[in-house]
Structure formats: structure tokens, C-alpha cells
Amino acid sequence: MSRERTAFIRHASAEFLPFVEFQVDKAIAYAERLWERLSERGHGDHKAAEPRASRDWYRELGDQREAFDKFWSAFGLKRGRNEAAMTWGQKIKPDADTAARIIRAAKAEAEARRLLPAGSTPIYAQGWLALRRWDDHDTTPTPDATARAKADARRELLSEIASLRRLLDGGKDEAARAALTAQITALEARL
């Protein structure tokens, strides 16, 4: 009897007991018949899955292999190379600039890994790549990031100015109005 069947019959018998006036043999018989009917309809024991043929993702990298090798060397944690190669070649597919950024960040990650407390589990290369952790280490601002930061700062200033103007419109105290006007003028000068 399979473990799956045994577990099913135990569980089903326990569920049936109140309905058969706690007659254990009757509950087990019901559970066994239910298992047989479920099996007839394809819901019983499952065939063992055939092992899947593994692929050599590292060999499939082709022209990306040289950049991946530099990353692998820089990352330093030598576990799961095939899985990391799969992520590199299938998910990331970096151009030369991105590969250089990843390699720089991998060196920084290897250095930071040395500072982990004893007993900590480091992230493997595949997970590090899949989670785009190189972005955590890359401090070089890109033109897009700089433009976004400026636009965000401007939007924040405009929002603050609008809030202060609403307060100014509703205020009656002259001293408070003067202070608000001074704040608005200072913020407008920063635009």
C-alpha cells in the first residue's frame, strides 16, 4: 500500500467516524472504497515522474560565455554555475555595458560576503542575478536616473508650494501669512 493511499485512508476514516456511529471498521471500509473509486477515475496513486533531462546552460551561453566567466570569477561563490548560466543567458542577456556593471557589482558582493556573520547563508549567483542585485551595488548614476531624480525633486517642491499656498489662502493671522509667504518664496527660488 502506498504512503499516499495509507494517508488518505487514515484521514478519510477519521472524517467518516462520526457518520458511521464511530464504527472504525465501517469507516475504514468506506475510505478504502472511496480510494478505489477515485483511483478508477484517475485520482489515486500517481505514476512516478520521469527525471527530466538536464541541460548544460553554461555551454549554451555561446558568445556570452566570456562575460559570464568574468562574472563567475568575480562573484566568488562557486555553487550553482549551471543555474546561474541559465539566468544569465535566458533572463538577463546583458549587453557589454550591463555585463561590465554586473561584474563590478559581483566583485563588491564578494567583498561584502566576507562580512556576513558566521552561520549566515549567502545568496547564490543564480538568485543574485535573478533578483538584479547588481543594481544594489551600482552607484554610478545613469543619465536617466539623474533626470528622474531631478524631476522627482521638482515635483516634490511644486507639491510643497501648492500645500503652503492652500494654507496661505485659508490663514487669517498676519504673522503666519508672512511666514508662509517667506517659505513659498524660498521654495520657488530652489526651482
Image: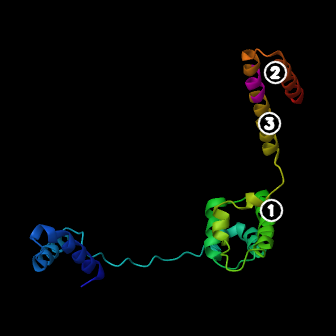
First in residue order: circle 3 vs circle 2? 3
Q: What is the x, y in percent for residue 130?
A: 63, 63
Q: Residue at x 79, y 36 (%)?
A: 153
Lateral position of residue 162 relative to residue 2, left or right: right
Q: Which residues are magenta?
A: 160-165
Which x, y percent locates residue 79? Answer: 66, 79
Dot 3 surroundings within 10 Å: few (below 14), some, or many (20 or more)? few
Q: Which quarter shows the C terminus?
A: top right
Secondary structure category for the residue under label 2? helix
Type of residue at label 1? Ala
Q: Secondary structure at mark 3?
A: helix
The image quarter in which residue 167 lies? top right
Label 2: few (<14), some or many (≥20) within 10 Å?
few
Q: Please tell me the numbered disc located at residue 153.
A: 3
In the rendered view, does 84 fall on the left or right side of 5? right
Of badges 2 and 1, the one in the foreground is 2
Foreground mark, 3 or 2, reads 2
Q: CA distance from mark 2 to mark 1?
A: 55 Å
- In percent of the image, x 78 and y 70: which residue is there? 112
Give the main secondary structure of the magenta stretch: helix
User: Which residue position holds label 1?
Assistant: 100
> Which image quadrant for residue 5?
bottom left
- Report the residue marked by disc 2: 176
Q: Position of residue 38 (x, y in %)?
A: 19, 69
Gap between marks 1 and 3 measured at Cα = 30 Å
Asked if residue 178 lies in the magenta stretch, the reply is no
Q: 84 or 168, which is in the foreground?
A: 168
